[in-house]
Amino acid sequence: MNPLRILLLTNRDSDNVGDQIIEATVISIIKGVMKNLGFAADDFTISSRAAGIISKKYMKTKNPELLAAAREELSKADLLIFGGAPLFNYAYQNFYLRTITTLELAQEYGVPVLFSSIGVEKFDPNNKKSLALKKALGLPVVKQITTRDDIDSLRRYAEGTDVPVAHVADPAVLADIVYRKKPEKPAAPKPPPSIPLRAKRKLKRIVKRILSPGTETNSGPSKRTASSQNGATAAQSSSSGRTGPSVSSSSSTPTPVKKTIGLVVTRAGIFADNGIDFTEDDQRRFWLDTIAVLTERGYDYRLFTTGHFSDEVFLDTLIKEHGVPANKAAVAVNSPDELIRELRGCAGVIAYRLHASITSFALGIPSVGLSWNFKVPYFYESVGYGERALSHDHWTAAEVVPVLEKAMSEGVKKDEEFLTSVYDTLFSGIRDVFAPESTAKPFTLDELWDGMPRQLATGPKGYRDKVNRKLRRTYENYQKLSDKDQKLTEGKQNEPALEQKPTAAPVPQNEGEESGTVTEVLLLTNRDSDNIGDQIIEASVISLLKAAAKNLGIGTGSLKIRSRAASIISRKYMSTRDEALLEPARRAISRADVIVFGGAPLFNYKYQSFYLRTIRTLELAQEYGVPVLFSSIGVEPYSDSDSRSQQLREALNLPVVRQITTRDDLDSVKKYVAGSDIPTSLVADPAVFADTVFANVQGTVRRDPAFSGKRIGLVVTRAGIFADNGIDFPEAEQRKFWLSVIADLEARGDDYRLFTTGHFSDEIFLDSLVRHHGVPAKKAAVTLNSPEELVEQLRACDGVIAYRLHASITSFALGIPSIGLSWNFKVPDFYRSMGYPERALPASEWRSETVIESLDRAMDEGVTKDPDTLMSVYTTLFSGLKGIIAPDSSATAYSLVELRSNIPQYAGTTRRQYREKMSRKLRRSYGYYQERMSMDVSKLPQVGSGGSKRGRLNRRLKATRSGRDRK
């Protein structure tokens, strides 16, 4: 017998982590119900899909072919459950139309439908949309409808039918059960200590008594008793999993810990969308006042969101422009685990977002809800705390904070009958469909702790999927804003150069254990860049440093590599010259034995001010007497007449500078240090060893074994990069170029794969190709966020056409022929150094037929590597390190064969590192978004009776700020 198939539709793909908590909770409830009814785990399957199973494109075109995926899902289902989504929305969204179409398909295939704890908009007998929804809800397949909010409207929707309706709790009120911590396994009994160990311990006790004669001899047992009791209490709290945040106790008087208050912000335009006169400035002022009041009353605080990218844009501005410390905020929240972790760290919560309030309630954390629509007070009234929902006329710190303090003094009490209402109704609905003869009774609340399975932490793939959806949603909004801007600013073709924002200091990579005498290398790279090429450089330099240390006889336990961003001197310091802001850099530099700048464009002064930070780093290195090596760095041309270039020249001639090697402009490097004895050299990019460093990363992109053609990787770039480099090649031309390449490849039977090297601005361009220009989504990897992901994409290709240099360099390392589209001098410099100058094509040759012909020749010839060129980056790094940390060593540099056998492989991106990368990328994109939103349009001309362009632009910008989440 085939297992029963349950199709679950939720808002699972929303950025709102609350919707993801709902999905997890409903899945757990369904599994609990099936267990309750006597079904084994293999008797059924749950297929969880987004509630928008009917695509927007279908709703727009009514093309029946676009219903194929929905038909397949519904035709296989034995039961359809809508779980927790606002499925009746018609006032601000057209979601109701997709709900109607889904119901019509369910009726066609005879699939019973349950609506569980859904969001409902007001029933309006005079509204055609509301009446169309009422008609669909009367279809025979609809077996039950329950709502978490407007039961009166729901009764009117179901009036005239025999469909049972009910007001129930939100599924997320059971989040404490679903997200309960995994019970700890009892520790295995320790073996009895050996006789020598017992004797050693006894001797220590005797010595301690002699040295501390005033210590009472009976204090030991009493401490052990207290410790045991405290341990028992903690264990009970942990094992039950049903209490709020536990507080560990100690036999000594604990240091008072400030209570942390969670502050959950929202997007700027949500109030206007709901008819509330409360501007972005008003919300900002409210939070800053609240922070001041909480601080004055002795509380700590933590700002975060429930994951909406537009909410995070607002929070990002509080940090960047209004003085909120970065360590007091979690700007990017991307999974239920992260939101729950933030909430569990709080003693109380003040929230605009409803599901922060609901999840806080589930976790036993008192909260105050700031009511901007009817759903917020509905929830608080339903759980017996209506006074904790404050309308907008009470949104002042002086009123909100006392209400929260009162809530914290009262705590959270839960009505068992209300909590189980969402379970009980779903139990009855599923029982009537699958087991109408069953006499089983629904689990009690206590039984649900065992009956409902625990939700596992979001896995790496799930996390990537969530973040990729979020990024693509942000890109869609950026495209809309950019399109409006482009239309209104009379022919403005190119985006401004995107200057990357500084980020908080990253968590150091533990690259060695401290034992005995440890040589500490401070490695400075562009590791925090979105450009995955820079992350590949960092990994490659770390591996080369480890190999060089081993080559010099330095063991892994005697080497510590502290990898930091090359911008170790903060941008804030550069603008304020506040010496206190140098403390992190001083600490890192003062404890280092050598500083290595690895692979970054550290001499840039024309388009960036990076050279100033390089200079200040060198000055600090000179102050602390720490030798400096520059390895395979990027160099802008030297200038005798440019004061910036001369400032850099002066710093590079400081005595601490021991070596400078470059991957491109050796002539300029020699001019920078002319008259000194600093050795210089032209070397390969560290990423030429990516094939060895990433040998454990293989291509995972599927290929059809029956396909006989070639797969070509197409690496796009951002729209404005050409204008920034003096090339007349607007966004429309790049788009036309790629679409021509795709058409020509398809015409001759080849496959293709579009991707980027991770720049969010490049991904915006690629996203537009997929959304608006017919490129199939399955042919593109719109978001890439780690070195492994880029290497996997490249390994799946037979050839590559790339604008981004490090796609070319990494392809070369992997033995994959490539064509570089040259938009600055570094691209042809690289191909020339590798012996393939003809594979770098200038803008005059960016035509599909020319580029493809060049790639064909490259694929026919393959990739041949010159060992001396490859080894240049290693041998110079080896000699530089040897001169500093092992000047008396007689060791000689490894040969290429020896190096490949001794170079350590990349350990992989940990989940924590992946989260950090994503947080940085999202925050950079938010900075870009803020810049576009606050752009100066004051000089736009006045036109016609339709109002000024400035006025129209402001109205459109306001609409974009508001977004579309009006629930």
Image (cartoon, grey):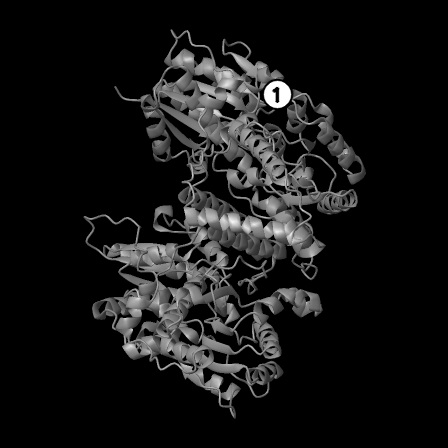
Which percent across, then down, holds residue 629?
48, 77
515 sits left or right of 345 in the view: left
Residue 924 placement: quadrant = bottom right
Binning the other alpha carbons within 10 Å of mark 1 as few (below 14), some (14 to 19) or many (20 upward) gives many
Q: How many numbered callouts? A: 1
Which percent across, then down, holds residue 415?
62, 18
**Vertical order, 88 against 396 (above or below):** above
Which residue is farthest bottom? 675
Q: Which residue: 47% across, 82% down?
A: 659
Reading the image, the residue beneath label 1 is 150
Quick one: quadrant of the C terminus? top right
414 or 479: nearer the viewer: 414
212 sits left or right of 820 in the view: right
Which percent across, then down, holds residue 455?
46, 32
Which percent across, then down, holds residue 574?
66, 69
Residue 903 placement: quadrant = bottom left
Q: Amino acid at mark 1?
A: Asp
25 sits left or right of 868 in the view: right
13 or 632: nearer the viewer: 632
Quick one: quadrant of the N terminus? top left
**Vertical order, 479 against 396 (above or below):** below
**Vertical order, 727 against 758 (above or below):** below
User: Would residue 669 be visible to someone looking at this image?
Assistant: yes
**Vertical order, 801 against 308 (above or below):** below
User: Would residue 953 be visible to someone looking at this image?
Assistant: no
744 sits left or right of 28 in the view: left
Asked which secondary structure carries label 1, the reply is loop
